[in-house]
Amino acid sequence: MKKLVGLLVGAMMMMATSAMALTYTLTQTDLLNLHVLESTPIEYSTSPIPDGTGAVKFSTIFKPVYQLNAFVAYGLEFSTALDLSAYDKFELVVTNRNENPWNFGLFAGAPSLDYNSLPTSVAVDATTVLTLDLTGMSVSDRANVNELGLYLNANLPIIGTGGEEDYTAEFSAAPVPEPGTMVLLGAGLLGLAIFGKRRMNKEA
């Protein structure tokens, strides 16, 4: 039991330490306000909607013309610059709900340069955490972010299971769980471990 308590305390200390490396994530409200900032022509993009799990669902229909690349960037534009100088990274959880793989990434717009993460291929029904390393931005740009969001792209035409061309991209995005939530979970487990130890002592 002492070993278990020791492990839990150690885990909590590690989580508290990792919490010092601050991660910026968009809230569900932010995600619901994302809109198309740039695209390789699309037919239409529906407004983001909650999917009932804390995530937000997106759907984009690309124009039915041959293109070498389908691309769309969803983001927020800030009239007052967003100061992210205290953060080390920007992260979002993304799930691919389409019947084809798509490439996803994150971006941040700044006065001198726009920054983006490399595209990550997300398989059908797979979920991944997208990360943009903010330490790669200049100090001035990190303190004056004017756009923030995510993008997806793929080569077209994409062939569906029935042989038809598929130009639909559906996915959901969710905030990354706060480190504080993990610390609370660790504290709860620690409390259970201590309770169990006391109970064992009483029975003895």
Image (cartoon, grey):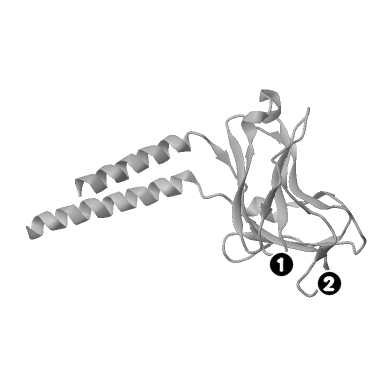
Q: Quadrant of the C terminus?
A: bottom left
In the displayed image of the protein, which residue is found farthest to the top?
139
Label 1's element?
loop
Residue drawn at 57 percent across, 60 percent down: 54
Disc 2 marks a residue whose amino acid type is Glu
Residue drawn at 43 percent across, 48 percent down: 182
Q: Nearer the viewer, residue 63 or 121?
A: 121
In the displayed image of the protein, which residue is found farthest to the right?
65
Locate residue 149, reporting x and y percent.
Answer: 71, 46
**Disc 2 versus disc 1: distance between alpha carbons?**
12 Å
Disc 1 marks a residue whose amino acid type is Glu
Where does label 1 land, which residue? 99
Q: Work out whether residue 143 can be spotted.
A: no
Q: Nearer the viewer, residue 24 or 91?
A: 91
Q: Nearer the viewer, residue 133 or 19?
A: 133
In the displayed image of the protein, which residue is found farthest to the bottom?
162
Callout count: 2
Residue drawn at 89 percent across, 62 percent down: 63
Left or right position of 136 against 152:
left
Label 2's element?
loop
Residue 164 tag number: 2
